[in-house]
Amino acid sequence: MTDTPDDVVPPTPATPRRRGPGPVLIGALAFLVVVSAGLAVVATRYRDAQNQLPRLTGIPTSISTSLADLMALSPVPGALAPDFTLVDQTGRPLTLSSLRGRVVVMEFMDTHCTDICPIVSQEFVDAYHDLGARASRVAFVAVNVNQYHAHVADVAAFSRDHQLDTIASWHFVTGAIGALRRVWNDYGISVIPRGPRVDVVHSSEVFFIDPSGHERYLANPVVDHTKAGTAFLPYAQILSWGRGIALTASALAR
């Protein structure tokens, strides 16, 4: 993945003028350009100052304001995260409450997604490595949103294809459609199935749950698209997201 895909078309350069104006007119134009540029800078600074959002209270001090803005990171009231019993990619039953004592970073993923889910997967893998010694205190969980591909083999294949199974504490859970729908509803996740061969349209939030099982932070992953519709995100932003996830989890693991 590169910062700029090959099919992103660069801006077309302006067509050069064939004849230039006289020297007096050149000087006048240069003066106007300088004045206009100065006014533009002042206007931009004023606009940015007017539009700049204040830093939300409760954001971990280890996370810069720019990184928090990139992640759209926000504190949540701290309610107990709804429990569930589903089956992970190894075929073993998993309850959310069984992860008490560890920070849980949880996302909702489509087992056949070709859009944002693979990008979030890479961010999770990067976050796991960024955690270093604290990785054992953090669990990464994804809940399946694809009702057409809800078997253990489906979540196992996605985990393998995107190296998520390299995370020691990784759990991609699935189950009966009724059980999955209850989890989606409990967490306010919108799921719109469009068929077995098409990506599921769904909410994509990252939940940060503290070791006592309470929701503490919410982040909103983003993705860009090429002109051909292929999802991508500049690699620097993927790395920043991974670092931000690790920092947020670390703040809760203390």
Image (cartoon, helix red, strand yellow):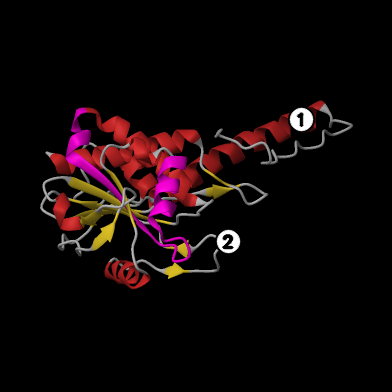
Mark 2: give few (<14), some (14-19) or many (20+) Cα within 10 Å. Answer: few
Q: Residue at x 16, y 63 (%)?
A: 79
Left or right of 82? Residue 23 is right
Instruction: Return the x and y of residue 25 as percentages of the image width and height.
Output: 78, 33
Residue type at numbered disc 2: Arg
Residue 63 at least partly seen: no
Instruction: Return the x and y of residue 200 as percentages of the image width and height.
Output: 49, 63
Residue furthest out toward the right: 18
**First in residue order: circle 2 vs circle 1:** 1
**What is the CA distance from the residue labelled 2 to the residue labelled 1?**
61 Å
- Locate the C terminus and report the quarter of the image it occupies: top left
Residue furthest out toward the top: 23
**Which residue was labeled with disc 1?**
26
Q: Toward the viewer: 225 or 189?
A: 189
Q: Toward the viewer: 251 or 55?
A: 251
Q: Residue at x 20, y 43 (%)?
A: 60
Looking at the image, is 20 positioned above or below residue 39?
Answer: above
Residue 19 at least partly seen: yes
Q: Which residues are magenta?
A: 133-161
Q: Quadrant of residue 20?
A: top right
Residue type at numbered disc 1: Ile
Looking at the image, is 253 positioned above or below residue 210?
Answer: above
Confirm whether the magenta stretch covers residue 4.
no
**Which residue was labeled with disc 2?**
197
Confirm whether the magenta stretch covers residue 150.
yes
- Locate the N terminus and report the quarter of the image it occupies: top right
Looking at the image, is 221 positioned above or below residue 126?
Answer: below
